[in-house]
Amino acid sequence: MILEVATLNVKAGMEFEFEQKFIQASSIIESMKGYISHELKKCIEKKNQYLLLVNWNTLEDHEIGFRKSPEYQDWKSLLHHFYEPFPEVLHYS
């Protein structure tokens, strides 16, 4: 199993809208091959920072199966405009 970790810095004042769109986007990622589970954690000290944790069967399930899929384009259009700067995504075994 691979853990994807992304620190998401959401543009100030857009936190509520981001959280609503993330609920909608969750159904996209949940439908992907190799997806196991995910959590979105909101930072206590920085109200516009979130930690996204996604468990995948393999690195390829995330990097190829998800990121190169048509569904990823929907995920991207729902969420990517909220981030500043764009998040660094790392993987852990």
Image (cartoon, rainbow, N blue to C red):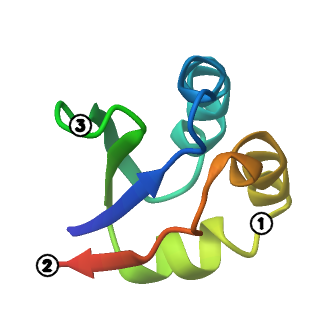
> Is disc 1 placed on a helix, strand or loop?
loop
Judge the density around disc 2: few (<14), some (14-19), many (≥20) Cα neighbours within 10 Å.
few
Q: Quadrant of residue 14?
A: top right
- For the residue pair 41 and 10, the one nearer the viewer reads as 10
Viewer-proximal residue, 76 or 37? 76
Element type where label 3 sits in the image = loop
Q: Which residue is mark 1?
A: 69
Q: Quadrant of the C terminus?
A: bottom left
Rendered location of residue 55, percent (x, y): 29, 55
Say whether residue 78 is left or right of residue 57.
right
The amino acid beneath tag 1 is Ser
Q: Residue at x 48, y 82 (%)?
A: 60
Classed neighbour count for the residue bearing mark 3: other residues with Cα under 10 Å, few (<14), some (14–19), many (≥20): some
Q: Residue at x 77, y 66 (%)?
A: 69
Residue type highlighted by circle 3: Cys
Name the mark on residue 43: 3
Rendered image: mark on residue 93: 2
Residue 66 coordinates in the image, percent (x, y): 63, 65
Front position among marks 2 and 3: 3
In primary-sequence order, the first of circles 1 and 3 is 3
- Of 16 and 40, which appears nearest the observer? 16
For marks 2 and 3 on the same chain, the one whose residue lies earlier in the sequence? 3
Amino acid type at image mark 2: Ser
For residue 89, side relative to residue 77 (left or right):
left
Q: CA distance from mark 1 to mark 3?
A: 30 Å
Is 25 drawn above or below residue 9 in the view shown?
above
Disc 2 element = loop
Residue under the point 74% across and 58% down: 72
